[in-house]
Amino acid sequence: DAGITQSPRHKVTETGTPVTLRCHQTENHRYMYWYRQDPGHGLRLIHYSYGVKDTDKGEVSDGYSVSRSKTEDFLLTLESATSSQTSVYFCAISGPPDRPLQETQYFGPGTRLLVL
Amino acid sequence: GNSVTQMEGPVTLSEEAFLTINCTYTATGYPSLFWYVQYPGEGLQLLLKATKADDKGSNKGFEATYRKETTSFHLEKGSVQVSDSAVYFCALIRIMEYGNKLVFGAGTILRVKS
């Protein structure tokens, strides 16, 4: 299994508060991704990173920001949480050093977020 | 645009039954195709993949063949076990300017009864 951890694993928060989720990898993969999983939608890409300080938006990026200050950490911030952001959030990585163009993505265990 | 459509679930089977989960896709060109599996309370794991037309991906008794004529990538297993109960996601890869993006189907819940 790829060395990917997510924290916290569970979070309950109130509408309007900021929330930061952390993804940490020990594999030195170049690319990191944040997805959200909702019933009937599968997983949808929020933001991704293609290097330190290099990020771009996915298809459902409104209300979210990200940062990557070092290779191993990718942070997802909900600037002002809303009930529609209640979801399960997954981090993924791809692009190991010896195969930077590898297509396979490896997923973390997920963070379950409830916004009341 | 790129999209993936999976058969709706849940699919409920008895142990040792034959499994088919249908997946069709819409894409520009011939992207690599994937099946991921999610066991209860866990993240997604790669089950199998195929990178070009007529390729067959296989793993743990599961198989899927990349069919460009029918734009399909159906998942099959000859004899399911209770431990196969999970959510199965079909996905294609979309090449972006930097990195790749997985486009997922909605997922199909499989329940196997003993």
Image (spheres, rainbow, N blue to C red):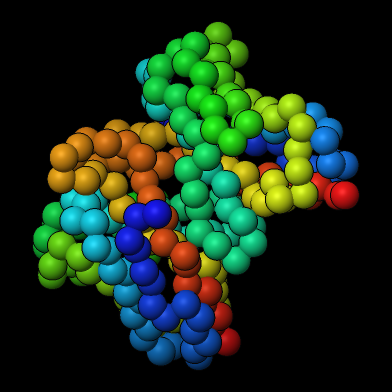
Residue B100: quarter of image:
top left
Residue A9: percent from left, percent from top: 47, 77
Residue B69: percent from left, percent from top: 55, 9
Query: How many marks on residues?
Result: 0
Residue A57: quarter of image:
bottom left
Q: Is residue A82 left or right of residue A76?
A: right
Residue B12: quarter of image:
top right
Residue B82: percent from left, percent from top: 77, 49
Residue A67 showing in the rendered view: yes
Q: Residue at x 52, y 39 (%)?
A: B47
Q: Residue at x 32, y 74 (%)?
A: A22
Residue A78 showing in the rendered view: no
Q: Residue at x 34, y 63 (%)?
A: A4
Q: Residue at x 38, y 71 (%)?
A: A6
Seen in the picture, residue A24 relative to B32 is either above or below; the reply is below
- Quarter of the image containing the C terminus of chain A? bottom right
Considering depth in this image, is B70 or B38 the residue closer to the camera? B38
Seen in the picture, residue B83 relative to A89 is either above or below; the reply is above
- Quarter of the image containing the N terminus of chain A? bottom left
Seen in the picture, residue B105 relative to B53 is either above or below; the reply is below
Residue A30: percent from left, percent from top: 19, 51
Seen in the picture, residue B15 relative to A79 is either above or below; the reply is above
Considering depth in this image, is B97 or B102 the residue closer to the camera? B102
Q: Is residue B66 left or right of residue B94?
A: right
Q: Is residue A33 left or right of residue B40?
A: left
